[in-house]
Image (cartoon, grey):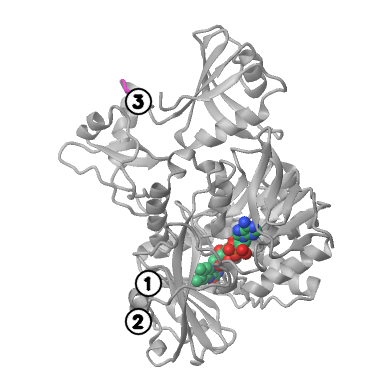
């Protein structure tokens, strides 16, 4: 077969995400999809994954996406004839204190709201399902009968086979060496074998994605981190043993050939490849770090005493890309049209693969995601600070360490702060401000009363800021308050066509005389709200837009992409000004 010179859609990377995306693109009717893999399918992070497929996440829609994965995995072997190792043996999640129990009760309520089966169990009921564990400190457990496990390589090869059956071309041993853009849009890719023209590029290159994106000025904030799990000799684990997560001890388990696979999230993670991923790194593992794993092992010995006598077959150490907020990255890059991204799977890419590929394929073909996917949307990041390696590394290591810790409401990250402050920062700090961070900016969340500490105390009940915020709220309603909006994103819209462009983009009337301000939204084709902002008219040809700190990238991209054709207008981000 001659090497192709063009394709409609090129998917870069043959791990589970690239294969699932290609499979779903073809399933949804895309005719000319080409997947390029620099070495062999599965040779990145996919081949060494442990294979747990759990569904429970803190965001309801991400849980729904993972539920979608399972719907796909259940029928895949029958559809393609390629084994997947899929086993729906259920999943248990333990709670070892009252707050964790509240967390899983809340998750059960959310799960019920979209029909995901989840039961709350007593410690004894949990042990009946998982006889190898000690339950002396267990308060309760959640049980999801539809969780399961799979063989990561087999499930990926099955998706690849299904993709081929639907017409996708897959070429191995060809690396993409550069991305070509024309007028800010995808134009093609350079490879080791030559140029291939295309309309759409999809970057699913795992931990290599950051460097590939950089070639076209696309910010993909990733940090590779070492992750380890242990495999034991057979130790009496029943073949139908559910997977088990014990977040209070930072560990997880699954059954494998009568033994156990046990891994965990160390509080002091080790970053990998600070100077770039070494050449020739494929089907590669890192050296086992028994000393680093000791803390995890200590916790596991308490939960599963059988580990003290079970022979250890091996300690797998593999790198995987993690992100600064622990969620993966999907969607169209704000910097380039028709360049899509699906990467950064934070050690749950096997669980996410089916659903993420399903969502990304629809996003590519329809131009919008099939459901609200803001927690994983690439536009939640910004070139500042997420284009800076040092920031991304520090924040990502904190997120890794928090993978299993309690996800408190309103929890703030502590690393890489303060990074960007307002001119009023010291004044506000002196007034007792307790700061949070948003897209790199320090922002006062609340003000401590004299004599009390400006420090959040997290809980599932009323948190310690409640009264202070109440007082501030009353002041705003009844007296006077002054807001520091330095962190808010700000744009100038300038030019002869400014009024026409904004009149087209905004739901409200922004054609008023200079000196007027309008609070308005920008809507998508279904009338859903995309941007929520204020538009001030400074002059006939000059508008000033203020939007939320976290929506900086999203709102700018939305405006630029939806301008009327040939609009005589220039939009500039002037936030720092
Ligand atoms: C020790 C460990 C245990 C894990 N356990 C689990 C688990 O139990 N459950 C779970 O859900 N997840 C688990 N994971 C996470 C899971 O392995 C990953 O999230 C998943 O494999 C990521 O898939 P991917 O397709 O994004 O990346 P990858 O599998 O890394 O695929 C990316 C592909 O892109 C290719 N590529 C890179 N650059 C180029 C280029 N320039 N041109 C062409 N191709 C290119 C690479 O060769 C690679 O094959 C674990 C991870 C680790 C490290």
Locate the C terminus by quadrant.
Answer: top left
Please name the residue that numbered disc 1 is placed on: 249
Residue 138 coordinates in the image, percent (x, y): 38, 75
Residue that label 2 marks: 302
Q: Are there few (<14), some (14-19), or many (20+) residues within 10 Å of tag 3? A: few
Give how far apart the Cα atoms at labels 2 and 1 are.
Answer: 9 Å
Which residue in the rendered view is the most extreme toward the front?
A: 193
Name above or below for residue 105 compared with residue 548: below
Q: How crowded is mark 2: few (under 14 residues within 10 Å), some or many (20 or more)?
A: some
204 or 260, which lies in front? 204
Element on which disc 3 rests:
loop
Q: Give the range drawn in magenta.
A: 480-484
**Contact (CB < 8 A) between labels 2 and 1?**
yes
Q: Quadrant of the N terminus?
A: bottom right
Q: Position of residue 219 (x, y in %)?
A: 53, 44
Q: Residue at x 29, y 27 (%)?
A: 423
> Label 1 CB, ligand 1: below 8 Å?
no
Q: In which quarter of the image is ligand 1?
A: bottom right
Q: Earlier in the sequence, mark 1 or mark 3?
A: 1
Look at the image and tell me whether residue 352 can be seen. Answer: no
Neighbour class for label 1 at 10 Å: few (<14), some, many (≥20)? many
Q: Find out whether the residues at labels 2 and 3 contact each other: C-beta distance under 8 Å.
A: no
How far apart marks 1 and 3 lie (CA) works out to: 42 Å
Q: Is residue 264 visible?
A: yes
Q: How far apart are marks 2 and 3 (CA)?
A: 51 Å
Magenta stretch: includes residue 481:
yes
**Magenta region's main secondary structure?**
loop
Disc sitting over residue 483 in the figure = 3
Q: Which mark is residue 504?
A: none
Q: Is residue 511 left or right of residue 389?
A: right
Could you say where residue 516 lies in the image, as x and y percent from the top left? 51, 11
């Amino acid at each position: 077969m001659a090497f192709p010179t063009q394709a409609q859609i090129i998917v870069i990377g043959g791990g589970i995400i690239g294969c699932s995306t290609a499979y779903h693109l073809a399933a949804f009717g895309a005719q000319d999809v080409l997947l390029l893999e620099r070495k062999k399918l599965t040779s990145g992070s996919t081949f060494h994954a442990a294979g747990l497929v759990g569904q429970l996440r803190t965001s309801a829609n991400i849980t729904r996406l993972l539920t979608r994965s399972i719907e796909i995995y259940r029928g895949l072997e029958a559809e393609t004839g390629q084994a997947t190792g899929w086993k729906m043996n259920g999943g248990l999640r333990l709670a070892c204190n009252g707050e964790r129990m509240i967390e899983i009760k809340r998750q059960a309520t959310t799960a019920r709201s979209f029909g995901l089966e989840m039961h709350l169990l007593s410690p004894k009921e949990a042990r009946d399902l998982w006889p190898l564990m000690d339950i002396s400190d267990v308060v309760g457990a959640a049980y999801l009968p539809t969780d399961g496990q799979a063989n990561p390589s087999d499930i990926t090869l099955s998706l690849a086979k299904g993709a081929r059956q639907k017409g996708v071309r897959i070429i191995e041993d060809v690396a993409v060496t550069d991305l070509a853009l024309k007028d800010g849009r995808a134009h093609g890719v350079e490879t080791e074998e030559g140029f291939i023209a295309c309309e759409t590029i999809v970057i699913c290159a795992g931990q290599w994605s950051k460097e590939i994106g950089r070639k076209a000025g696309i910010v993909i904030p990733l940090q590779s981190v070492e992750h380890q799990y242990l495999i034991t000799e057979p130790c009496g684990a029943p073949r139908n043993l559910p997977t088990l997560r014990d977040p209070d001890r930072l560990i997880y388990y699954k059954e494998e050939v009568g033994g156990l696979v046990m891994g965990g999230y160390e509080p002091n993670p080790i970053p990998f490849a600070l100077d770039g991923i070494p050449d020739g790194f494929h089907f590669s593992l890192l050296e086992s770090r028994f000393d680093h794993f000791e803390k995890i092992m200590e916790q596991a010995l308490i939960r599963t005493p059988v580990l003290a006598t079970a022979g250890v077959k091996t300690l797998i150490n593999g790198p995987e890309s993690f992100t600064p907020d622990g969620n993966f990255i999907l969607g169209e890059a704000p910097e380039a049209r028709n360049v899509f991204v699906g990467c950064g799977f934070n050690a749950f890419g096997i669980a996410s693969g089916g659903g993420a590929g399903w969502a990304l394929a629809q996003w590519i073909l329809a131009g919008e995601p099939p459901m609200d996917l803001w927690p994983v949307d690439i536009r939640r990041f910004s070139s500042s600070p997420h284009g800076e390696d040092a920031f991304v590394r520090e924040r990502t290591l904190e997120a890794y360490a928090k993978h299993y810790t309690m996800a408190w409401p309103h929890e703030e990250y502590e690393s890489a702060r303060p990074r960007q402050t307002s001119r009023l920062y010291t004044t506000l700090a002196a007034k007792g401000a307790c700061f949070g961070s948003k897209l790199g900016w320090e922002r006062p969340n609340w003000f401590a009363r004299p004599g009390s500490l400006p420090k959040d105390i997290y809980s599932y009940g009323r948190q310690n800021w409640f009264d202070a915020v109440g007082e501030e709220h009353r002041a705003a309603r009844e007296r006077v308050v002054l807001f520091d909006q330095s962190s808010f994103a700000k744009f100038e819209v300038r030019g002869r066509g400014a009024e026409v462009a904004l009149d087209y983009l905004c739901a409200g009337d922004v054609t008023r005389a200079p000196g007027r301000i309008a609070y308005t939204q920008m809507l998508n084709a279904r009338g859903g709200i995309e941007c929520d902002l204020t538009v001030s008219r400074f002059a006939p040809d000059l508008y000033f837009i203020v939007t939320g700190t976290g929506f900086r990238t999203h709102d700018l991209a939305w405006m630029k992409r939806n301008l009327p054709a040939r609009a005589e207008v220039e939009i500039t981000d002037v936030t720092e000004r």
